Image: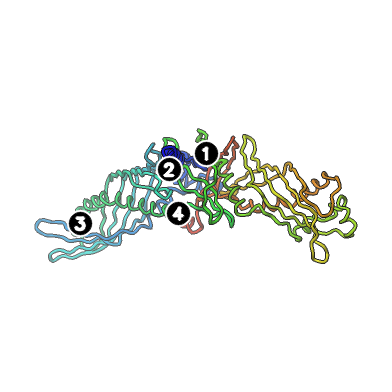
Amino acid sequence: MLKTWYFVLLCWLSLRLEANPGLKVRITQKGLDYGMRQSEVKVMTKNFPSYPHCRRIGMELVKQAVLKETFPSWSGQESLSVVKVNYVISRLRINAVDFPETSASFIPGTGICLSVARASATISADWRMNAWLLKGKGEITVSISGLFISIIFNVSRDSTGHLSTLLHNCQLSIGSVKVKLSGRSSWIYSFLSGYLEKPIHTKLDKNLCLNIKYKIQMMDAQLRKHKVLSQIDTFAQVDYSLLSSPAVFKSHINLDLKGTVYPVGNHTDPPFMPAPFALPNQGDSMIYLGVSNYFLKSASLAYYRAGAFNITISEELATTFSLNTSLLKYFVSEMSLSQAAACPVLLNLMATLPPAVSLNADRCVLQITGSVEVFAALPNSTTQYIFTGNLTASTTANLTITKQKLIISLLLKRFQFSLLHSNLGFPEQKSVVENFLSYALRRVVIPVINDKLGKGFPLLNLAHTSLTGPAIKMNQGHLVISTDVHYQPEDREDEDLHSHS
């Protein structure tokens, strides 16, 4: 018996370790290129401001980051015959940088390669020298050309499900370094100009890759701070943690996310597992997002556990939507006799099961099972109980994408009703009751549910980025969203870009 339980435990652990994702994200080569090649079309920006690929993002943003960099001072010593000259270079600042050739590519099984060729930069600084009987100071201008940098960094998953980055390789070569000094003494200028080119070249060779490594470590630290649990609304949260390290291929990178929706404060996993599914073998869009039936089922369960499907139609709502006893008195004789004026009808609806979600090749169906209590709000501020029943409503879900969110809107297709109890004695007019409930569901209840669903499910968390031309493709058991992205910098960031153009 013990061996049997041991075998069952091993099987359960293997299932958990090989868990399928609820969400899949694919970034294609087209998406990778978008962030790298915008600087090559910057001339087009003024003529075609609405064209999505004419924004100088990617390397232009890298340029601005480089221009804002600060560098520590350094000192050294050079010899002229028997004279030792000590020098200090301080207040280093990059005045201009140009990346005429940039590229980005996926390295299968490893990560991403970013490269810059034929880059150039202009650096200014202050210099000061001190030797036997000699002193001098002034400004220095360093012109760097023929700079080549190739960076490969790994992408992986850390122990908490965050995306992690690590420098894998950095290659650097500098074509030439030219130094121009300004100062009072021409012979000091001639001396130091020639002697400073080599140490500056050496300093750049030694420190550039170290600085890049430090920047990637900073990026990794920021990624680890990023919240993998995202708040949807007051009812639910979604877990975007990585299940495994990203799978890198030549044409794209795939990220498998847990994609489980939980009630706020209750992170108990659903009693069902996600089924495997695959993204299409396409690369026409920048990003592909796969949403499994599991994701929608876990959302349905989370909202059910949070009580989001328990709805009360108040007197105010009933009055707004003309939901009153005039729709009922034709089959409730006691009400017809006791109330001459139409009274608002109140409804208490409670889901008795989590709504069942199914994704098919052409539609998404949501079936809601629950109970309903119906009351009349009388003029004397009391309520009169009318009836209680069970109902099952079948709805189709219209799915749209707005502001990086999946918006679900329900449309009632049909429903079934069974009477449980009534104090007023129903005649045999079931169809009239169903017509009333159909009216109430279509005009009041479904709009209330759609208002809650209208907040949407967050799909991506890309700052200052909008989805361009998103398209939804329904499949059996999952749906695929294909989209391009458009980066819109903040006003201050946009001003920075123009100020250096």
- Identify which amino acid the numbered label 4 is placed on: His
Instruction: Give yes or no for contact between labels 4 and 2 (Cβ–Cβ under 8 Å).
Output: no
Instruction: Give yes or no for contact between labels 3 and 4 (Cβ–Cβ under 8 Å).
Output: no
Mark drawn on residue 226: 4
Nearer to us of marks 1 and 4 is 4
Indicate which disc, 1 or 2, sits on the residue closer to the N terminus.
Answer: 2
For the N terminus, the quadrant is: top left
SS label for mark 2:
loop
- Identify which amino acid the numbered label 3 is placed on: Leu
Q: CA distance from mark 1 to mark 4?
A: 26 Å
Left of 60 or right of it: where is 274? right
Label 1 sits on residue: 285
Q: CA distance from mark 1 to mark 2?
A: 24 Å
Instruction: Give yes or no for contact between labels 1 and 4 (Cβ–Cβ under 8 Å).
Output: no
Label 2 sits on residue: 244
Nearer to us of marks 3 and 4 is 4
SS label for mark 4:
loop
Instruction: Give yes or no for contact between labels 3 and 1 (Cβ–Cβ under 8 Å).
Output: no
Count the marks: how many? 4
Q: CA distance from mark 4 to mark 2?
A: 17 Å
Label 3 sits on residue: 192
Q: CA distance from mark 3 to mark 4?
A: 48 Å
Circle 3: is it few (<14), some (14-19), or many (20+) Cα within 10 Å? some
